[in-house]
Image (cartoon, coloured by chain):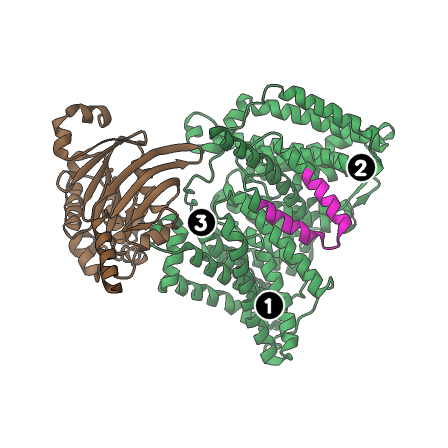
Amino acid sequence: MSRSASTDAAAERAARPLLEIDGLSASYGRATVVHDLDLTVARGEALVLLGRNGAGKSTTLKSVMGLEVERRGRIVFDGQGIDDWPTHRIAAAGIGYVPEDRRIFAGLTVTENMAVGRLPPRDGHAWSEAEIWELFPPLAAIRERRAGYLSGGEQQMLAIARTLMGNPRLLLLDEPSEGLAPVILERIAEAVGMLKSRGIALVVSEQNLAFVRDFADRLLIIETGAKRFTGTIADLAADPSIAERYLAV
Amino acid sequence: MLASLLIQTLNGLASASLLFLVALGLSLIFGVTRIVNFAHGSFYMLGAYMAVSINVWLGGGILGFWGAVAGAALAVAAIGLVMELTILRRIYRAPELLQLVATFGVVLLIKDATLFIWGPEDILGARAPGLTGSISIFGKRLPLYDVFLILLGPAMLAAIWWLLRRTAWGLRVRAATEDRGMAAALGIDQARLFTSVLALGAGLAGLAGALALPREPASLGMDLSIIADVFVVTVVGGLGSIPGAYLAAVIISVIKAWCIGLGTVNVFGTVVSFTKLTLVAEFLVLATVLVLRPHGLLGSEPPAQRGAAHVHAPLPEPARGFWMAAGLGLVAMLALPLFADRYALVLLTDIAVFALLASSLAILMGWAGMASFGHAAYFGAGAYGAALAALAGAPFAVSVASGLILATGLAALIGRLAVRTSGISLAMLTLAFAQILWAIAFQWDGVTGGSNGLVGVWPPGPLASKTTYFLFAMLTAAVTLGLLWRLAHSPFGYALRATRDNPRRAEASGFDTLALRWSAFILSGAIAGLAGAIFVFSKGSLSPDVLAIPRSVDALVMVLLGGFETLAGPIVGALVFTLLADWLTRTTDYWQAVLGAAIITLTLIFPHGIVGTFERWRARGDRQ
């Protein structure tokens, strides 16, 4: 009886989206940056937030983490309301966050950075260092180097690797392509695609459509903190006026 | 000569170890929590007192001494833990100055608690059994206990290095020190980390206090005297750098030991007392390091603060009818003598003086974004300058001008060094300079009257009555504040605030930010000096207390009470604080503890000051 009730509950949880955001407003002091935003992310889905600088993409991701922003609205992750949780608890629940400016610990070595991100196994799996070296081979060679001496691309890899050590179910990537050389971009896009194929859901904030082309399931365009468009890459391509209005510089 | 220099060096190294232990705790706590814990000196003092009592309780001897050292460290660690859980935890997001002031509330509480438990007399501690002997070096004696302390410093440095580099806890501390927000986003529970760091830091200070006992008695002055030294060490070493703290502790302790060791020396026919030069030596070390390396010997530029906690609200334009209201208020104030008795008049004069002092500090903090934690230095310089001139026979106006000039000159000198730093380093630095000045006033019997101070400084005939002096003080304050308010909305005021909000961008826009900050510092010092000069003639006497840390903190509390985001804030703060302090001192012997508790409570309730908090509430009401 109780067993079937709990399987029912598990089945119900599995049927719900992994992340549901309902009526999110976020502000820094007196400036409100995100207005009444709704979005959902299904299990294993890759959602891409598109929009210009200052559109509210980063703030949306920070709101999910409860980091450095005042937020109102309902945020449900895996069936649990997390909007009043402290940041560390949100991370422990399985949301990994890779910030825009990477925020690697410059004084720590590559492996130390990764050790800081280590959390207990989830769903029977824990990322090992070996798996990380496989995903990002360049990191293996510089594992004892201080992270402050890493190149931009290496820092981006490290920032993702560090977050993976927490075995997230959902990965929030904030502008991973920013300021990186095309050859590095390709490698990181490939790695992100690989993470998606391993069942990790993604919310990627981006301005570079080419970077997300291979793994994006759905696009969501944000402008001045509100949702303007959702659809697939094909939908966006079908109506050039949308990209013209919200994405062109 | 050489042998005695060597002994003094070793002596200095022994002192350096204790200083380092306290600075180490302060640095660790600052690293992860970004809070400079003013109460760290109080932890050191408590460690000493507790060690005395625990030693007695354990029956003395080897067990008693070392049991007391361990017990005191643990007990003080527990107090640090309680402080984190009850106070600090609630103010991590508050502006950093408020945090400093809140921890100063703890200083007052602990001081009165210590007075209540152990009484006002100094208490001699036991010597360390087994280490009471001495060794001989070139015919000079060095106590074994000093040898133990000399070895302790590097040993603790190594132990902390191991803890930070080789343990999971240390890794989390280092990560949170670099970027606590990111550490939290990776699943690190900041609250637990902060609690443990507070306990460790407090425990180290308690340990140092207990270990200091064989060298100095437990006394109620230990807290502020060590904290000033620790601030110097932290700034010289580089904020957050642990090896830097050790290096700075060694340099400063050894130079002090040399000065004391040299004693009075006849240099080319002039008698120079090096003992009295220790303070000047400290000042010179501090000044030299800051000129050559503004971030300290081994420090680097501090990481920028993240989050929205430090955005300054724009200074509001005076509302319509503001000048009219201010004028009416002034007329009402000037009419007060008709209703007030002598006592009330003195109190009202105090309010006028402190409104000036608080406003002088508020311009520095609010407009220039620089928090002076030693504003008593300029207030005191104004008071001493005016008093010395008056006692030398100068007329009243010349005396007040002398005070003003001395304070302005001092602010120019200290400001020149201080504006090179910013934020918390600047706060610590200004406090250290003020403490050095206090010590000079306290020791220079021939000029300042030493601890007795100066007496018989009264205003001349027409101003001799309490009523006329009150009118003079109130008018001077009103005119000065009126000019300041005009200045707030002048190009100078705008440029200053631009410098505060984004120094790099202001510099790129063609502002000489250092010069702007320096002029703000000088202006602020001059007004504080004016306040001091008016103050001394209202009291008739002065003591080094006008320069002491508590006076600086009083000024800060006034500013924070009223808030520095508005022009009227500091005046409201001065009014509330002066009345509150007057009522408290008449009501209880333990007024410091009550004041401390009040400061803590107020900072928890009004994180933006009274006026600022009400304005925020009003703004919120407007939006809904």
User: Depth check: B494 or B447 in front?
Assistant: B494
- In the figure, is residue B365 to the left or right of B173? right
Start and end of the magenta stretch? B576-603
Q: Which residue is mark 2?
A: B344
User: Drawn colour of chain A?
Assistant: brown
Q: The N terminus of chain B lies in which quarter of the figure?
A: bottom right
x and y, in percent, of residue B462 in the image? 86, 27
Query: Tag 3's secondary structure?
Result: loop
Return the residue found at the far front: A1
Q: Is residue A185 one of those drawn in magenta?
A: no
x and y, in percent, of residue B140 in the image? 62, 71
Marks 1 and 3, how far apart at CA: 29 Å
Q: Can you say whether B16 is above or below A186 in the image?
A: below
* Point 27% across, 30% down: residue: A52
User: Depth check: B20 or A160 in front?
Assistant: A160
Picture quadrant where residue A236 is located: top left
x and y, in percent, of residue B553 in the image? 63, 45
* Point 16% across, 40% down: residue: A216
Q: Nearer the viewer, mark 3 or mark 2?
A: 2
Q: Is residue B578 one of those drawn in magenta?
A: yes
Q: Label 2 sits on what residue type?
A: Ala
Q: Label 1 sits on what residue type?
A: Ala
Which mark is on residue B560? none
Q: Which residue is mark 3?
A: B299
Which mark is on residue B210? 1
Label 2 neighbour load within 10 Å: few <14, some 14-19, many 20+: some
Label 1 neighbour load within 10 Å: few <14, some 14-19, many 20+: many
Parent chain of label 2: B
Res. B188 in view: yes
User: Drawn colour of chain B?
Assistant: green
